[in-house]
Image: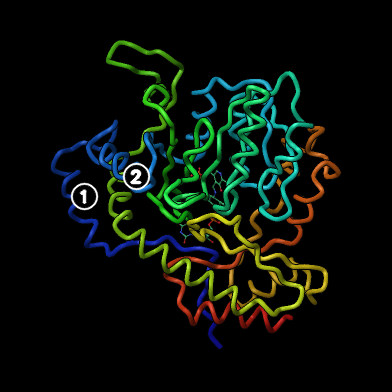
């Protein structure tokens, strides 16, 4: 018997190859490959319009954008962040010589719990680095209030939050001092590799633009120890093409999300994570929680699906705070992070991407139901 075709947790949306050809021809003809070329400029403008934000600085990837965002605001000392994220969130702090202080998550939204932030603030705290996990917005108002009271900066890791709106017409990227996007292949909007910093004012954008270009202002002036974080013309042109298809891709994601919820609603011991009540969602992930009354453990279900060539993923297990470079920190103790520890043991992200067919989704559902 032949193995069923693999179904991965995600698959990048790729337009017809022929649609990319004209972009390549333009690059070949003008020979501008990078360093803020025409596609780079066009994509920054197009993304500002699409997302409803003032300024965007494109980057080679989301991680370098995070590292640079912290540099741009001159963040030092200690930063409060979530253990329930991709490891790049905390790594960006270590790359800046900053000490992460982990705070537990809210059991409903799975985002940094604002009720627990104040207790973790010390005289060394300079900023808060929350994540809009799965594209579900943080409690941005509560976080801003704390930041204002203690004079802290807020940098959102918005790697999952492309296109999300908290209220109609208000992008989630408009909150905090800076927001960082990822355009990695696995994200709802991808440029193969890529990322961006969203900033509220032109001065911040200018500083970030200098920082991502070695600190150069002109041929002979270097104003900061910058890095090379520039997005290439190849990536930027692909982003422009992706933008043409993003609305259709989002509609398809919403339909898949709704189908999962309907098909799994009555499965005992399985809970679909609800969104955070945002006006516009992006359905970037489909996390479910495997509760003790499900007949299989989360890991047994994960394994059973793998045997059927269905590659669901345990985002985010292990917790960042459990990795060797973090687990010695006092704030990384599991006793300090009971909610995150529990969710990391229960979570499984099911396949969701625009090209997932109904038949393949039915295969995922049938395999889960067969275990229930
Ligand atoms: N902050 C947060 C909250 C993040 O989630 C991330 C990245 C970052 C910051 C950093 O942003 P970047 O520097 O990456 O721009 C993936 C991604 O590599 C990572 O970007 C992402 N978060 C994370 C949540 O997921 P892996 O190790 O799970 O990727 P991988 O290679 O196992 O891919 C998952 C599945 O996707 C594969 O099984 C098949 C499919 N796939 C993947 C790639 C790369 C494709 O079909 N084509 C592809 O090209 O980390």
101 is higher (above) or lower (below) than 74? below
- Judging depth in this view, the residue of 316 and 173 nearest the camera is 173
- Residue 78 lies, with reference to residue 295, above or below; the image says above
Query: Which class describes the residues within 10 Å of circle 2: few (<14), some (14-19), or many (20+)?
Result: many
Residue sitting at x 36%, y 25%: 202
Of circles 2 and 1, which is in front? 2
Residue positioned most to the bottom: 1
Near mark 1 (Cα within 10 A), the count class, few <14, some 14-19 or many ≥20, is some
Q: Is residue 278 above or below residue 45?
A: below
Mark 2 residue element: helix
The C terminus: image quadrant: bottom right
Is residue 292 shown left or right of residue 114? Answer: right
Q: Could you say where residue 42 lies in the image, as x and y percent from the top left?
A: 25, 41
- Which residue is at 33% across, 49% downward? 239
Tell me: 210 left or right of 40: right
Along the polypeptide, which appears first: circle 2 or circle 1? 1
Q: State which quarter of the image contains the N terminus.
A: bottom right
Q: How far from the left and from the top, in percent, is residue 132?
A: 58, 47
Label for residue 24? 1
Q: Which residue is mark 2?
A: 47
Give residue 30's position: percent from left, percent from top: 15, 39
Left or right: 285, with 94 as reference point: left
Q: Residue at x 50, y 37 (%)?
A: 179
């Amino acid at each position: 018997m032949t193995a069923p075709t693999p179904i991965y947790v995600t698959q990048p949306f790729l337009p017809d190859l022929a649609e990319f050809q004209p972009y390549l021809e333009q690059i070949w003809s003008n020979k501008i490959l990078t360093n803020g070329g025409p596609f780079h400029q066009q994509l920054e403008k197009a993304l500002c319009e699409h997302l409803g934000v003032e300024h965007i600085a494109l980057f080679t990837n989301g991680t370098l954008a995070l590292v640079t965002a912290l540099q741009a605001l001159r963040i030092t000392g200690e930063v409060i962040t979530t253990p329930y994220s991709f490891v790049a969130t905390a790594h960006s702090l270590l790359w800046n010589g900053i000490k992460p202080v982990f705070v537990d998550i809210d059991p409903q939204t799975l985002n940094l719990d604002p009720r627990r932030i104040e207790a973790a603030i010390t005289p060394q705290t300079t900023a808060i680095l929350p994540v809009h996990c799965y594209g579900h917005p943080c409690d941005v108002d509560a976080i801003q209030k704390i930041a204002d009271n203690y004079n802290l900066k807020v940098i959102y890791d918005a790697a999952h939050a492309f296109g999300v709106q908290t209220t109609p017409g208000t992008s989630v990227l408009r909150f905090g001092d800076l927001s960082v996007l990822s355009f990695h292949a696995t994200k709802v909007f991808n440029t193969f590799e890529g990322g961006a910093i969203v900033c509220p004012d032109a001065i911040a954008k200018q500083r970030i633009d200098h920082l991502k270009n070695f600190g150069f202002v002109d041929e002979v002036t270097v104003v900061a120890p910058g890095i090379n974080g520039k997005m290439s013309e190849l990536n930027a042109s692909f982003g422009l093409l992706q933008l043409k298809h993003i609305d259709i891709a989002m509609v398809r994601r919403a339909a898949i999300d709704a189908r999962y919820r309907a098909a799994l609603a009555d499965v005992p011991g399985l809970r679909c994570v609800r969104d955070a009540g945002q006006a516009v969602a992006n359905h970037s992930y489909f996390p479910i929680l495997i509760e003790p009354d499900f007949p299989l453990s989360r890991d047994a279900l994960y394994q059973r699906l793998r045997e059927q060539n269905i590659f669901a993923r345990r985002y985010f297990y292990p917790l960042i705070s459990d990795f060797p470079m973090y687990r010695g920190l006092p704030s990384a103790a599991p006793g300090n992070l009971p909610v995150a520890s529990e969710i990391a043991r229960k979570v499984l992200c099911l396949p969701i991407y625009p090209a997932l067919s109904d038949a393949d989704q039915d295969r995922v559902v049938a395999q889960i139901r067969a275990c229930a």
